[in-house]
């Protein structure tokens, strides 16, 4: 019974739940960005490059086919996701409360005494 309780406590910690939500949203966001890249951006880029279809770009080496066009699409996909996540995190940090400066906290008695000793030693 204690293992189940420990697992429940672990699974319900804030960080684990936040991570799970992030993974789920990230997966859905990744699908949206992949669709944006595959269905909108790459056809426009291909048309600008005189009808190049990146999905068909490949080199045959022996019996293997190296699909470097798919790799180009994956790189563009990654760059767009990274760019969007960068700006999402940047926007989220603007809404967070600023952390109080270290000197703004009230000093303890020990800190006051050490400060007085320091000042006396300077004289």
Image (cartoon, rainbow, N blue to C red):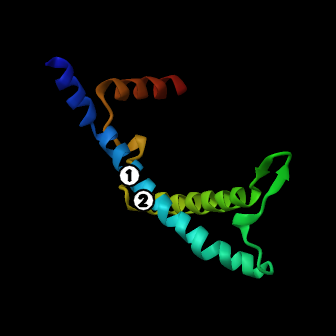
Q: Determine which of the numbered discs, if any, sits on residue 72 in the image.
A: none
Q: Residue at x 60, y 63 (%)?
A: 80
Residue 49: x and y in percent read 79, 78
Task: Report the side of 47 relative to 91 (left or right).
Answer: right
Q: Relative to the observer, which residue lies in front, 103 or 45?
A: 45
Q: Are marks 2 and 1 in contact (CB under 8 Å)?
A: yes
Residue 77 lies, in percent from the top left, at 61, 61
Q: Is residue 73 above or below residue 15?
A: below
Q: Residue at x 43, y 23 (%)?
A: 117
For disc 2, the marked residue is 28
Q: Position of residue 29 (x, y in %)?
A: 45, 61
Res 123 seen here: no
Q: Is residue 116 above or below residue 103?
A: above
Neighbor class of circle 2 (other Cα within 10 Å; few <14, some 14-19, many 20+) is few
Looking at the rendered structure, the secondary structure element under dot 2 is: helix
Q: Residue 3 is drawn in which quadrant? A: top left
Which residue is tagged 1? 24
Tell me, yes or no, if residue 24 can be seen here.
yes
Please give left or right for residue 110 compared with residue 75 in the image. left
Give the left or right position of residue 103, taking residue 42 as reference.
left
């Amino acid at each position: 019974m204690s293992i189940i309780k420990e697992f429940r406590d672990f699974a319900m910690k804030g960080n684990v739940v936040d991570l799970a939500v992030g993974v789920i949203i990230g997966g859905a966001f990744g699908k949206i960005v992949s669709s944006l890249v595959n269905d909108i951006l790459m056809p426009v880029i291909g048309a600008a490059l005189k009808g190049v279809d990146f999905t068909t770009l490949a080199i045959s080496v022996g019996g293997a086919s190296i699909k470097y066009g798919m790799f180009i699409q994956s790189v563009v996909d990654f760059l767009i996701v990274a760019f969007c996540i960068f700006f999402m995190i940047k926007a989220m940090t603007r809404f967070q409360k600023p952390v109080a400066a270290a000197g703004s906290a009230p000093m303890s008695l020990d800190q006051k005494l050490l400060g007085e000793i320091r000042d006396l030693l300077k004289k």
